[in-house]
Image (cartoon, coloured by chain):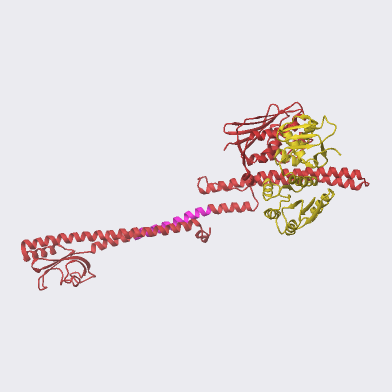
Chain colours: A yellow, B red
Amino acid sequence: MRILVIEDDSEAAAYMAKGLREAGHVVEHAATGTDGLFMATSERWDSMIIDRMLPGLDGLAIIQALRAAGNTTPVLVLSALGKVDDRVRGLKAGGDDYLVKPYAFAELLARIEALSRRVSAAQPETRLKVEDLEMDLLARTVSRGGRDIDLQPREFRLLEYLMRYAGQVVTRTMLLENVWEYHFDPQTNLIDVHISRLRQKVDKDFDLPLIHTVRGAGYTLRAAR
Amino acid sequence: MRPDSLLRTTTFRLALSYLGIFTVSAMALLALVSWSTTMFIEWQVQETVEAEATGLSEIYHDRDLGGLSEIISQRMRQDVDGRTTYLLMGLDGRILAGNLKAWPAEVNDLLGWVRFRVLPLGGIGAGAEVLAHAYELADGYRLLVGRSLADAKRVKSAINRALGWGLALTILLGVVGGYFTSRHMLQRVEEMSRTARRIFGGDMSQRMHLSGTDDEFDSLAESFNEMMDELERLLEGIRTVSDNIAHDLRTPLNRLRSRIDLVLLGAPDCDGYRRTLEETLAEADNLLATFSAILTISHAESAARLERFETIDPARLAGDVVELYEPLAEEKGIRLHCLAQTGLSLKADRHLLFQALANLVDNAVKYTPAAGEVSVSVGAASGRLNVAVSDSGPGIPEDSRLKVLDRFVRLDSTRSTPGNGLGLSLVQAVARLHNARLCLDDNHPGLVVRLEFPVA
């Protein structure tokens, strides 16, 4: 993926760029808002990471300018402002996701990769399939290897999210925000318990495990390699 | 008190302008009284003159010229004070009777009302103003009957004098009264500003003095004192937090530092580095979690979130929390259930309330031993909406129940379990934001934490 990083803190930008390159992406960096807007409009990018507070031009203003010009490149907004209001403001301006500083790199990577997936899965799907695991979104049924799996509504949504982003890492925060739809900090390993429950139903009786824990990051659903 | 500062007070200026308005209206009133009195007296004089003239013309009709002259002379003798003026003039301008030497110039040939000044018969003094009426009798004789206005003048000037004194007294009383009223007000204002300056100087315990009269100053002082109480509470909170941050965050930071220090002192060891880095990362994550909890609490306390309130279904919220914690409870062998009355609604910040309820359930599950029970209930009673989390754990001793709401406070019995001591502080901040009452009670056995929301 070609990723544009607009961030004025050079150390933070270097850290981000290094990590993203190691994950196999092509990264360019702009240090001011005006340079960033110029680079964003003059080349084609798969996604952008834009800091909210920038010298020259504010991050949200860049996004608004891009959206007004019909540019739909997915944007991840980075900010030290972490209140729900700030988040809402960032998303209203046209950002696709919002990440609060300080963040774990795994979180950033998972989110930026999920963003590009969101664009490619623009048309509504009615069936999801990973290996022999199948999900019917209309009938709300799940089966694996032809055997039906009985899931609670929340487990269904959890598995659905994992399957939509199959092969990618999803973090615990992403699951909380998208499956439970609350912004809050769980004090305990709540999500892990939910995942292990889901594993009991999806993986236990099968030879090939599909749900994997990614250390220090989150989970991924894919055939083991 | 300096007199110039008194002159500059609003009260005194207000008193002065009221005095000005009052003086002008009093003067207008006095002018009206004086004018109408004069009019009345002159009207009376005219009446008298007309009655006299009517009488004389009847006499002339009955007894002819001679009789009239005789009567006039007789009347003049009776009128010792010389209040009445008579003059009877023949066709050739000869004076036939009367106490004037000549037909007055002001009268000319006109008939009707006239005013003129006459010298008294003795010829001494300024002479009195006379209001007179000239008549033409049959056969061309002319008769002038007048009456002195000296009495009217005296009455008028007496009234004016009285009114003038009254006005002067009014102004004097107004100035003196204004001075004392404003001095009284100024004293209270100065006292308030002295108190404010003392507070500004750092003595937060200072409060405004109440006079006990329940007046505007008292109500101002009361509001001010309430504001100071709240401010002192907030400042105290900030002070406690910064003390606690210094203490509670320094410990893990120090641990972090010494861990890195130690591993750098030892021989290079790739696996050891990796392990240390992982531990360090976990420690840093804990620190960040603590920071974010502190920030969430201060956001909840700042009340700026009010704009984000929405109408929520408390039963659904409670159900979501229970559903989220159910697997964790099951893993610990704890029964977690939800008893929620449906059909209720609440104005709330959805995310913060969820966080608060999650903290309560988290605590309950954490401290309740296996085979215990935790329940979340939602219900309405006596005009309040209650959300309660109860458990069958060890509970909290009564004397510690208020203490655990403070930030970073952890009871000795819980030091070994993970946690940052901010969970209940956040619940309390969220409760305060929603105007809810937070109570901790004995559940016999265990603890019940109740949030009582006012129903709008």
Looking at the picture, does residue B433 appear above or below residue B382?
Answer: below
- What is the x, y in percent for residue B377? 65, 30
Looking at the picture, does residue B125 appear above or below residue A15?
Answer: below
Task: State the count of labels.
Answer: 0
Q: Quadrant of the C terminus of chain B?
A: top right
Residue B182 inside the magenta-drawn segment: yes
Q: Nearer the viewer, residue B175 or B417?
A: B417
- Name the dominant secondary structure of the magenta segment: helix
**Residue B280 visible, this orientation:** yes
Q: Quadrant of residue A66?
A: bottom right
**Residue A188 visible, this orientation:** no
- What is the x, y in percent for residue B28? 35, 59
Q: Quadrant of residue B49?
A: bottom left
Looking at the picture, does residue B289 appear above or below residue B194?
Answer: above
- What is the x, y in percent for residue B21? 41, 58
Q: Is A116 left, or right, of B170 in this rendering?
A: right
Which residue is depicted at the point 32% across and 60% down? B31
Q: Is B81 left, or right, of B256 in this rendering?
A: left
Boundaries of the magenta span: B164-187
Residue A189 inside the magenta-drawn segment: no
Q: Is A197 left, or right, of B126 in this rendering?
A: right
Q: Nearer the viewer, residue A17 or B347?
A: A17
Q: Nearer the viewer, residue B428 or A124?
A: A124
* Residue sitting farthest toward the right: B267
Looking at the picture, does residue B260 appear above or below residue B173?
Answer: above
- What is the x, y in percent for residue A203? 81, 32
